[in-house]
Amino acid sequence: MSNNQMGKFEVFIGTWNTTGAVLETALNPAGTLSATDMYGWLPGKHFIQHHVDARFDGKPSRSMEVIGYDAVKQQHARSYDDQGSTDVFVVELSGRRFKITGKAVRFDGGFDASQNRLTGLWELKVSRARWQPWIQLKLVRA
């Protein structure tokens, strides 16, 4: 595994203040999200750990993710949350554009020119070929 495959993810390293508007879906009402996202290199800089301490309408939700390079998928992440769930995602960072794709959720967003703000939209898969807007998200470097 080559360090330069992960080097472009240096932009994430540090602490981010996250806010979001949770949109109404068939399963959940509209609400708000606030979180602290912390990204840091694991020794060797082959993997990044991402810790999330979030609140959905004041209700705590915590998760941890490991982002690394996979030669077949090009980039991947595995997440774990405080409810015992785990998921695998393909992550892509091309220039300022950032995408996360999972089986049931996906994110499409972008960094501003200073790389201190990331905005985008999480979507939920509601049927085989249909995605529904879920969370309008903004991360600002702390």
Image (spheres, rainbow, N blue to C red):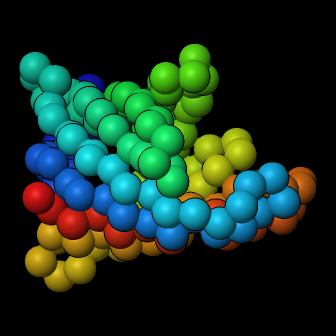
Q: In this view, does 20 lie to the left or right of 69?
A: right
x, y percent for residue 13: 14, 46
Which residue corresponds to the image point at 44% horizontal and 37% vertical from the top-left? 60
| Residue nearer the viewer, 115 or 21 | 21
Instruction: Give the residue drawn at x 10%, y 22%.
Output: 44
Quadrant of the image occupied by residue 16: bottom left
Relative vertical location of residue 132 with respect to residue 125 in this rendering, above or below = below
In the rendered image, residue 4, in percent from the top left (x then y), is placed at 17, 43
Figure check: 71 above or below 38: above
| Tag count | 0
User: Which of 121/22 is in front?
Assistant: 22
Q: Residue at x 64, y 50 (%)?
A: 105
Specify whether 16 is left or right of 106.
left
Seen in the picture, residue 13 relative to 48 is either above or below; the reply is: below
Residue at the bottom extreme, as displayed:
113
Tell me where residue 42 appears, x and y as whole percent.
16, 24
Residue 38 appears in the rendering: yes
2 horizontally vs 91: left or right: left
Counting from the top left corner in percent of width and height, residue 132 is at: 74, 67
**Which quadrant of the figure contains the N terminus?**
top left
Residue ranking furthest to the right: 128
Q: Locate residue 10 relative to residue 126 in the image: left or right.
A: left
Give the camera-side residue of 125 and 10: 125
Q: Residue at x 71, y 45 (%)?
A: 104
